[in-house]
Amino acid sequence: MILQKQGNTLKSQVAEYVICTRKKATSKKPKYYLLNTTDPEQKKYVSSLYPIAPDQYRFEYQGRYYILTEKEAEAEIVEVSNV
């Protein structure tokens, strides 16, 4: 899925996400996490974002694993079979 990137906001035609920063990262909770803001009245936590390379993160959602890659004006989320 390709998303348009505006600051920390990622948008497609069907969904909107925000990359948020935790106030206090720990060994089990990384600095960044993903929030679904498609419905502004019901923001939903998606997953912690685990860095695997510069501008690239791994995350899990509903038992499936994904890679989020950020670029200058867009981001891509790809499902992966193993992590």
Image (cartoon, rainbow, N blue to C red):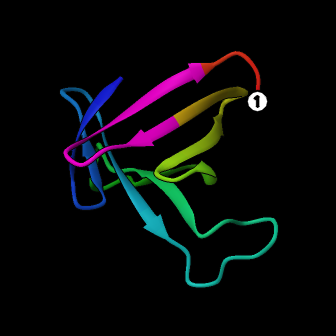
Q: Is residue 75 magenta?
A: yes
Q: Which residue is mark 1?
A: 83
Residue lying at 44% horizontally and 30% vertically, measured from the top left: 77
Q: How would you rate the neighbour count of disc 1 (Cα within 10 Å): few for under 14, some for 14-19, many for 20 or more?
A: few
Q: How many numbered discs?
A: 1
Residue lying at 80% horizontally and 65% vertically, measured from the top left: 28
Question: Which of these two is toward me, 54 or 21?
Answer: 54
Left or right: 23 with respect to 18? right
Quarter of the figure that contains the C terminus: top right
The local secondary structure at tag 1 comes to loop
Query: Whole-percent x and y of residue 79?
Result: 56, 21
Q: Which residues are magenta?
A: 68-79
Vertical side of 7 occupied by 26: above or below: below
**Residue extending furthest toward the right:** 27
Left or right: 64 with respect to 21? right
Residue lying at 76% horizontally and 76% vertically, measured from the top left: 26
**Residue extending furthest toward the front:** 54
Q: Quadrant of residue 60?
A: top right
From the image, give the main secondary structure of the stretch colored magenta: strand
Vertical side of 41 occupied by 80: above or below: above
Vertical side of 18 occupied by 63: above or below: above
**Residue extending furthest toward the top:** 81
Residue lying at 23% horizontally and 31% vertically, measured from the top left: 12
Query: Whole-percent x and y of residue 53?
Result: 58, 48
Quarter of the figure that contains the N terminus: top left
**Residue extending furthest toward the bottom:** 23
- Looking at the picture, which amino acid does disc 1 mark? Val
